[in-house]
Image (tube, rainbow, N blue to C red):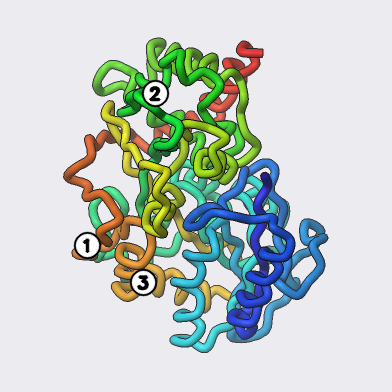
């Protein structure tokens, strides 16, 4: 099911949330929690304000924004937005207008609008995807970057949170099948029972592809023939049933449509944090690559000063601490705590990959994935 979220004016934020809740209950279009609003980069449409019509994909932000305002393109779910935007508006007096869609759609907008930017900031999108489009973003390094942990400091792209891909298991359906990592997904008993998205259009699915290739290749290699053979074998066991969005993957597991989901940490741990008893989050025993998500100023943004304040605020100790304790996210600022619902990094088998290499080879990797997927049919 395709999930969309709401565009809302900063000064109508709380009213918008209330109306949004009523609308969702009445229409029965949405379920889940945490990151369940994430969508496929190729199929999601931009969202309207809570009071606007649903024909949102044709809407655009105002060409000129008023002084003391900020237009933010975002891929992030409402739960994360609530941790950031109200506090920023209260602290700075700057009004925030949000336009929500998938990573792919927003990057296309930014490219097409490069001569006349319609937004000031892009909030969200994995580092490897955004790094490949670095030319469309302003090279701003926040003073708060001095407190960011090694591996996530600004290199032309600002990373503001870290996360990992993972597997989500429906404990009511799994029975005695053991799932501890990628290799277990090739179990014939799971054929057709695994949910996954398209790595060529979903950021989280591409991150899984990259993680698979690292895990299933000889040590120290980012990819190999062995790694790609694993991907092909997995696609056969998935039975070629690739879903049209990231949210459909984890939601399908929670709803009992699939036994295992190839998904990511935020929505998966959110289900557990919110009391779901029929799911278990599994971090692949073969290894987990810690990945950064970005927030960046769009090149030649009209509200440059406000955009810089927004970046500074997101990297502040105040916001970073909220990410680690109130949300299902990993802060990138040093000395910030995690909530009990998050697995400590020392309990994960962490692996690394050259993210610059990933960014440079992303298109080729996506093309190869598409070729392998075609072979399954």
Q: Are marks 2 and 3 in contact (CB under 8 Å)?
A: no
Q: CA distance from mark 3 to mark 1?
A: 13 Å
Mark closer to the chain start, 3 or 1: 3
Residue position for label 3: 319
Q: Considering the numbered disc 3 on the image, is that residue within a helix, a strand or a loop?
A: helix
Is residue 211 depicted above or below 7 in this figure?
A: above
Question: How far across and how far down the image is residue 230, in percent?
Answer: 42, 15
Q: Height in image: 368 above or below 316?
A: above
Secondary structure under the numbered disc 2 in the rendered image:
helix
Q: Residues within 10 Å of mark 3 (few under 14, many from 20)?
A: many
Q: Which mark is residue 3?
A: none
* Quarter residue 225 falls in: top left
| Distance between the alpha carbons at the discs numbered 1 and 2 | 29 Å
Q: Is residue 85 left or right of residue 12?
A: left
Disc 2 to disc 3, C-alpha distance: 33 Å
Q: Which residue is mark 1?
A: 334
Residue 126 pos. (x, y %): 47, 47
- Residue located 56% across and 30% down the image: 363
Residue that mark 2 sits on: 213
44 to 338, vertically: above or below: above
Q: Quadrant of the N terminus?
A: top right
Q: Is residue 110 visible?
A: no
Front residue (pair 13, 60): 13
Residue 18 location (% of width, % of height): 63, 77
């Amino acid at each position: 099911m395709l999930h969309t979220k709401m565009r809302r004016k900063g000064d109508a934020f709380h009213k918008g949330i209330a109306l949004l809740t009523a609308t969702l209950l009445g229409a029965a279009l949405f379920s889940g929690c945490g990151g369940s609003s994430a969508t496929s980069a190729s199929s999601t449409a931009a969202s309207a304000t809570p009071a606007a019509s649903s024909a949102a994909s044709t809407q655009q932000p105002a060409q000129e924004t008023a002084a003391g305002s900020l237009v933010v393109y975002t891929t992030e779910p409402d739960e994360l937005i609530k941790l950031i935007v109200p506090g920023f508006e209260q602290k700075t007096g700057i009004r925030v207008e949000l336009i929500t869609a998938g990573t792919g759609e927003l990057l296309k907008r930014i490219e097409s609008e490069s001569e006349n930017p319609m937004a000031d900031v892009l909030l969200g999108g994995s580092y490897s995807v955004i790094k490949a489009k670095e030319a469309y973003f302003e090279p701003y390094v926040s003073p708060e970057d001095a407190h960011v942990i090694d591996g996530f400091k600004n290199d032309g792209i600002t990373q503001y949170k870290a996360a990992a891909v993972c597997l989500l298991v429906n404990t009511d359906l799994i029975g005695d099948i053991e799932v501890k990592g990628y290799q277990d997904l090739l179990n014939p008993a799971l054929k057709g029972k695994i949910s996954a998205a398209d790595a060529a259009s979903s950021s989280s699915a591409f991150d899984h592809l990259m993680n698979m290739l690292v895990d299933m290749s000889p040590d120290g290699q980012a990819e190999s023939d062995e790694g790609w053979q694993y991907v092909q074998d997995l696609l056969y066991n998935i039975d070629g049933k690739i879903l049209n969005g990231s949210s459909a993957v984890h939601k399908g597991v929670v709803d009992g449509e699939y036994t295992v989901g190839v998904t990511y940490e935020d929505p998966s741990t959110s289900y557990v944090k919110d009391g779901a008893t029929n799911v278990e989050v599994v971090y692949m025993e073969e290894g987990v690559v810690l990945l950064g998500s970005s927030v960046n100023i769009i090149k030649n943004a009209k509200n440059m000063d406000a955009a810089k304040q927004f970046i500074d605020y997101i990297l502040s100790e105040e916001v970073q601490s909220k990410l680690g304790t109130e949300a299902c996210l990993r802060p990138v600022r040093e000395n910030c705590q995690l909530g009990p619902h998050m697995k400590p990094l020392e309990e994960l088998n962490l692996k690394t990959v050259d993210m610059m290499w990933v960014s440079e080879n992303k298109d080729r990797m996506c093309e190869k994935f598409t070729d392998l997927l075609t072979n399954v049919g």
